[in-house]
Image (cartoon, coloured by chain):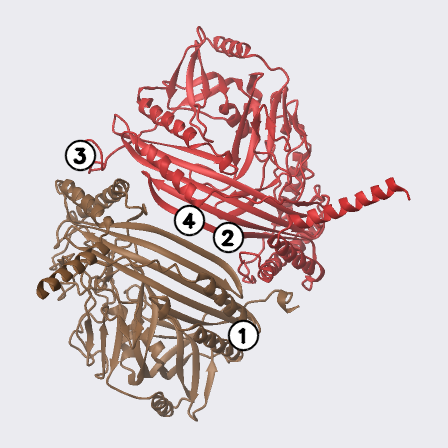
């Protein structure tokens, strides 16, 4: 009896869970997908892969500046895109025959009805698929007529997985106390006006959910929710030399409760205001080479740009790419105390929710933790379903912005060190290095906005990181705030200069932009000490404030 | 006690108080705040804004427009998009110099680029200091450029010893106009419902490939204030509908057409039933179009225009800058003395050469009647009270008489045959922005010797026979309620007046001397309300409401109608359309 009762309860709960995740859109898309495949499979060049993605989004965005509301927008809608391949896994329409040595197919998307009206949605799917098929078919014909060379070709698309996961609907995240946040951000940005010679004092609130669908002819049906609640605050002042000096704060969360309290944000803004006042008067630095510490925040960006992008496997396939690490599997690429993983399955790090988390990537492959570097040795790459030499399968890192074709991208990058140096220790080591190199000071990069890097052969394979808070640490221990520098360099040289790491970890949140668009990523790292870095002057131009004083000052 | 006098005094006091209170009642808190911000920032700039080595402004004018937009779009009866947004547009005009000579109407050929611009974000809502900051920054930017331009312009005139024949800015009296009415936009739910119903209705026909309906309601509240003390608050609203229909005909060709509607508010918008009738007509026409013969050869002879075809004809020929009733004031540049002198010589000629203003039939008279709100029972949407410069247009103004231009419509920048403002610088509403446009309001085209329908046809036939032909071309529009309608071409027989429709034909409305080719004009009138200018919005233009009162039919002599060849697009999809019979 008890057993039957338990079984009954289990059955009911399963049934209840199934009812909660019943999503009519899946059935509509599947039906039309099957119909399309039934007809197209009879063509001379039939598709072997057909997938539809739908991004069902809702968002609320608020922009305030200096106490004023500049814009407040709400919107919702659905964007559908279609991925269609003609040929076979071994050779399909995406084979590069351009001679340029790379391939990216862009995207193919359309706005579809917000309602689950089967006939209406199928009309859009039909038109979208027709365009996608003709493009793929014509590309494939070109491939067949091209000289593919004698070199053994790696396949063009790896076999996928049949996965089924339908997340329950979540409540609309844009339903929250908007007035309270509006009032708060207006007050925050109004308070920034207290800073003398202020140019900008802005706050931006972005609340959204993307319910992403992927349905493929391979039988995958995946629906995931990606809610977010984010705040960005930026402010800038006019320095004594009439150039603009900015500082930023950002807060990322999945839900409102993930964000710090308003008291904490207020305190952060007060600190930002103080720093702006100091930065205004800080001396401008000249180009420099010498030792430096990257704080944990900055270190994450450093690894993301210099290392992470060179781990993205799809690019390594092409001759146009720099392929920095392609032939270094099993070799020491970092100090032995460092290991690097990319883990999209990690939901939290030290109780902080990571925005690079997902269960399945945008090609329907289950997300996996990937050990890229183990004890200093290169062990893996980030793979989508575009295979490369020695890596024929995806490891769940095929990602893209809505409407674009996925390629291998980063997720949650975690840099772990077996070293355990405090910041004081790192500073002492820095000073030692300065003396050894006969430098009067070294640098401490404390915060950063982001960076960029080039990975192809047609430009210098360098990187540029844009710090906002930089200090000179003199050999007598003094610390001086400076401004106007960016960090530059090349990856291999830079890695060989890492000499120590810190004990405290921080996570950098951001949006990474590359071929397949903008995606949320994180990079968690300790502080690092680098024997030698190089800086260049930041680009800047003179700003002349208006002739008359700001209205509120009169 | 002098009771009547005291009574009158009391009455006057009461009236005065009422007027003052009425004035105060017109301005709600938001209006007051916005106008105050504009006024106080302007006054501060007029008093204090000056850069060393440059002249100070002599005129400043601010425009602020608050836009409310609601949009719903549907396809095959399903809602695709529904949004409601609010934003604010603004403009600062700063002039340096004087009414006679200032920085405008001039291009500095040697102007370098400048990073010397500082911006503030424009706030929404009744944000006094936010708005003042925006105006402060933009006034600074515009002033600096204007001051430099004026310096260069004055130097060029002095160096080249030029005589400036036409002033740069006309003077107008100070005026206050505060419209207390507020736009009432359609509810989002109503827009959604209508767009779904209309697109669903289209989808109900056979062989439909595209069935979309987009409805937009835009309300604008425009604020204007200038250094002369003119103060204007004006409301504008336009409701726009765009339907797109495409279907596959019997020859597997895809035919596409659209229907566009507008109204000043939903109450003035055609009803759903009316629009459905238009859809019925369009689909039936598309079904029957394959049986319509093509125009076999180019035609030259008399052409009769009817209804909206007449309105389109006059719109195309009159609403032209330079050659029609619109002004044309070019800028001169300081590249070299020769080009500057040539410019001023050309300008003098434009102002004095009578041949340039003989544009039409000698019987033709064109009058601007911007205050006329109704004609023969039809509402004229082009009627308005005041323009974007705060100038009230005259009740009646003759623009063309005896076929000659007497006066062009204009704003405050003088131009040949347009030396003063006619109150025609109008607000043009578009999706997300408001701009200014020189545009008419209500225009009436008249002729001295009008004829009856029978006489008109007789005149037409006479001309056909003179050409040794048996038939002539008649152009008219189908009986739809949309703003844009496809032209229909008919070959009409002289003998019995019977006619047959032809397709793949084209008539150029604006060939040389088109207005002089009018030989017969009907005594009845046709009223055409439409949106003029503005930004393209699919097939329906948001813009300025205009009304044209024209003869219901005219005959043109010796006009060309060409045959055109265009290939219809074949349906070449591989998979049958969902829901189609062959499935």
Provide the chain ID for the residue under circle 3: B
The colour of chain A is brown
Q: Position of residue B26 (x, y in %)?
A: 65, 48
**What residue is shown at x 65% (from left), y 43% (from top)?**
B413
Residue named by callout 1: A239
Instruction: Look at the numbered discs 2 and 3 and tell me whether their residues touch, using CB distance below 8 Å.
Output: no
Residue named by callout 4: B83
The colour of chain B is red
Residue named by callout 2: B87
Instruction: Look at the numbered discs 1 and 3 and tell me whether their residues touch, using CB distance below 8 Å.
Output: no
Chain-order first, disc 2 or disc 3: 2
Q: Quadrant of residue B213?
A: top left
Provide the chain ID for the residue under circle 1: A
Residue named by callout 3: B583
Tell me the CA gap for discs 1 and 3.
70 Å
Q: Position of residue B351 (x, y in %)?
A: 68, 35
Closest to the observer, B343 or B466: B466
Tell me the CA gap for discs 4 and 1.
42 Å
Foreground mark, 2 or 4? 4
- Would residue B464 be visible to someone looking at this image? yes
């Amino acid at each position: 009896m008890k057993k039957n009762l338990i079984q009954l309860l289990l059955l009911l709960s399963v049934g209840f869970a199934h009812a909660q995740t019943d999503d009519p859109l899946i059935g509509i898309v599947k039906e039309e997908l099957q119909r399309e495949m039934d007809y197209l499979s009879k063509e001379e060049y039939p598709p072997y892969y057909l997938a539809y993605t739908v991004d069902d989004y809702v968002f609320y965005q608020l922009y305030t500046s200096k106490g004023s509301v500049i814009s407040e927008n709400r919107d919702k809608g659905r964007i559908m895109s279609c991925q269609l391949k003609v040929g076979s896994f071994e050779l399909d329409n995406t084979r590069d025959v351009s001679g340029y040595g790379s391939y990216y197919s862009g995207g193919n998307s359309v706005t579809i009805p917000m309602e689950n009206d089967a006939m209406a949605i199928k009309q859009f799917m039909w038109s979208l698929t027709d365009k996608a098929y003709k493009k793929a078919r014509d590309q494939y014909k070109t491939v067949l007529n091209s000289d593919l060379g004698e070199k053994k070709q790696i396949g063009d698309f790896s076999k996928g997985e049949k996965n089924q996961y339908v997340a329950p609907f979540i409540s609309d995240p844009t339903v929250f106390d908007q007035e309270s946040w509006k009032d708060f951000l207006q007050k925050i940005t109004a308070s920034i006006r207290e800073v003398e010679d202020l140019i900008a004092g802005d706050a931006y609130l972005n609340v959204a959910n993307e319910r992403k669908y992927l349905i493929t002819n391979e039988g995958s049906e995946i629906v995931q929710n990606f809610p977010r609640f984010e705040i960005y605050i930026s402010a800038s002042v006019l320095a004594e030399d009439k150039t603009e000096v900015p500082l930023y704060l950002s807060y990322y969360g999945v839900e409102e409760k993930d964000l710090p309290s308003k008291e904490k944000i207020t305190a952060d803004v007060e600190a930002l205001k103080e720093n702006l006042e100091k930065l205004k008067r800080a001396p401008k630095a000249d180009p420099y080479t010498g030792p430096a510490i990257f704080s944990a925040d900055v270190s994450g960006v450093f690894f993301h740009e210099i290392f992470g992008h060179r781990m993205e496997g799809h690019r390594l396939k092409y001759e146009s790419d720099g392929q920095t690490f392609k032939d270094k599997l099993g070799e020491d690429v970092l100090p032995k105390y460092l290991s690097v993983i990319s883990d999209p399955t990690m939901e939290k790090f030290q109780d902080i929710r990571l925005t690079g988390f997902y269960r399945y990537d945008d090609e329907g492959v289950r997300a996996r933790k990937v050990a890229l570097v183990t004890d200093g040795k290169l062990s893996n790459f980030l793979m989508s379903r575009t295979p490369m030499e020695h890596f024929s399968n995806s490891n769940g890192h095929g990602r893209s912005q809505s409407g674009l074709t996925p390629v291998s991208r980063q997720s949650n990058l975690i840099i772990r060190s077996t070293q355990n140096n405090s910041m004081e220790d790192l500073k002492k080591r820095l000073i030692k290095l300065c003396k050894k190199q006969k430098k009067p000071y070294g640098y401490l990069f404390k915060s950063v906005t982001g960076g960029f890097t080039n990975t192809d052969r047609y430009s210098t394979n360098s990187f540029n990181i844009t710090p906002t808070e930089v200090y000179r640490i003199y050999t007598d221990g003094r610390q001086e705030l400076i401004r106007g520098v960016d960090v530059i360099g090349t990856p291999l040289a830079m890695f060989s200069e890492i000499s120590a790491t810190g004990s405290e970890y921080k996570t950098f949140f951001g949006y990474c932009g590359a071929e397949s668009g903008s995606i949320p990523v994180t990079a968690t790292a300790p502080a690092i000490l680098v024997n030698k870095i190089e800086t260049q002057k930041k680009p800047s131009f003179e700003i002349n404030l208006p002739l008359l004083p700001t209205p509120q000052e009169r | 006690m002098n009771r009547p006098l005291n009574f009158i005094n009391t009455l006057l006091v009461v009236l005065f108080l009422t007027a003052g209170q009425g004035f105060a009642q017109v301005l709600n808190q938001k209006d007051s705040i916005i106008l105050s911000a504009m006024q106080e920032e302007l006054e501060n700039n007029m008093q204090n804004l000056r850069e060393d080595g440059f002249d100070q402004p002599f005129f400043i004018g601010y425009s602020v427009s608050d836009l409310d937009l609601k949009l719903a779009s549907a396809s095959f009866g399903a809602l695709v998009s529904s949004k409601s947004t609010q934003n604010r547009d603004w403009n600062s005009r700063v002039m340096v110099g004087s009414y006679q000579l200032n920085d405008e109407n001039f291009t500095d050929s040697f102007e370098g680029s400048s990073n010397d611009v500082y911006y503030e974000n424009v706030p929404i809502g009744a944000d006094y200091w936010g708005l003042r900051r925006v105006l402060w920054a933009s006034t600074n930017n515009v002033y600096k450029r204007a001051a430099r331009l004026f310096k260069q312009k004055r130097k060029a005139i002095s160096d080249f010893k030029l005589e400036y024949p036409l002033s740069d800015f006309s003077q107008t009296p100070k005026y206050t106009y505060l419209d207390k009415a507020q736009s009432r936009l359609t509810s989002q739910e109503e827009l959604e419902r209508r767009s779904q119903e209309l697109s669903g209705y289209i989808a109900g026909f056979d062989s439909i490939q595209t069935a979309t309906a987009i409805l937009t309601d835009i309300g604008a509240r425009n604020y204007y204030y200038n250094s002369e003390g003119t103060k204007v608050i004006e409301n504008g609203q336009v409701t726009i509908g765009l339907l797109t229909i495409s279907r596959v005909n019997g020859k597997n060709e895809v035919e596409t057409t659209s229907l566009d509607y507008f109204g000043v508010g939903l109450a003035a918008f055609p009803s759903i039933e009316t629009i459905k009738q238009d859809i019925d007509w369009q689909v039936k026409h598309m079904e029957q179009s394959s049986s319509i013969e093509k125009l076999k050869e180019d035609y030259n002879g008399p052409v009769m225009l009817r209804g909206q075809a007449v309105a389109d004809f006059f719109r195309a020929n009159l609403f032209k800058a330079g050659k029609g009733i619109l002004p044309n004031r070019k800028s001169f540049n300081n590249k070299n003395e020769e080009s500057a002198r040539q410019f001023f010589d050309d300008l003098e000629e434009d102002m004095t050469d009578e041949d340039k203003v003989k544009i039409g039939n000698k019987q033709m008279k064109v009058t601007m009647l911007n205050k006329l709100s109704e004609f023969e029972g039809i509402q004229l949407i082009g009627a308005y009270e005041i323009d974007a410069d705060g100038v009230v247009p005259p009740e009646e103004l003759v623009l063309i008489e005896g076929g000659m231009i007497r006066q062009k419509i204009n704003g405050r920048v003088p131009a040949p045959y347009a030396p003063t403002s006619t109150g025609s610088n109008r607000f043009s509403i578009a999706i997300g922005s408001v701009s200014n446009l020189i545009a008419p309001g209500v225009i009436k085209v008249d002729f001295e010797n009008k004829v009856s329908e029978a006489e008109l046809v007789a005149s037409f036939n006479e001309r056909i026979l003179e050409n040794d032909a048996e038939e002539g071309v008649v152009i008219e529009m189908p009986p739809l309620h949309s703003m844009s309608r496809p032209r229909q071409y008919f070959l009409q027989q002289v003998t019995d007046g019977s006619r047959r429709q032809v397709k793949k034909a084209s008539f150029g409305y604006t060939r040389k001397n088109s207005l002089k080719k009018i030989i017969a004009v009907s005594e009845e009138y046709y009223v055409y309300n439409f949106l003029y200018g503005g930004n393209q919005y699919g097939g329906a233009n948001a813009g300025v409401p205009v009304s044209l009162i024209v003869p219901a039919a005219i005959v043109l002599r010796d006009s060309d109608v060409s045959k055109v060849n265009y290939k219809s697009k074949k349906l070449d999809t591989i998979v049958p359309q969902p829901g189609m019979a062959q499935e």
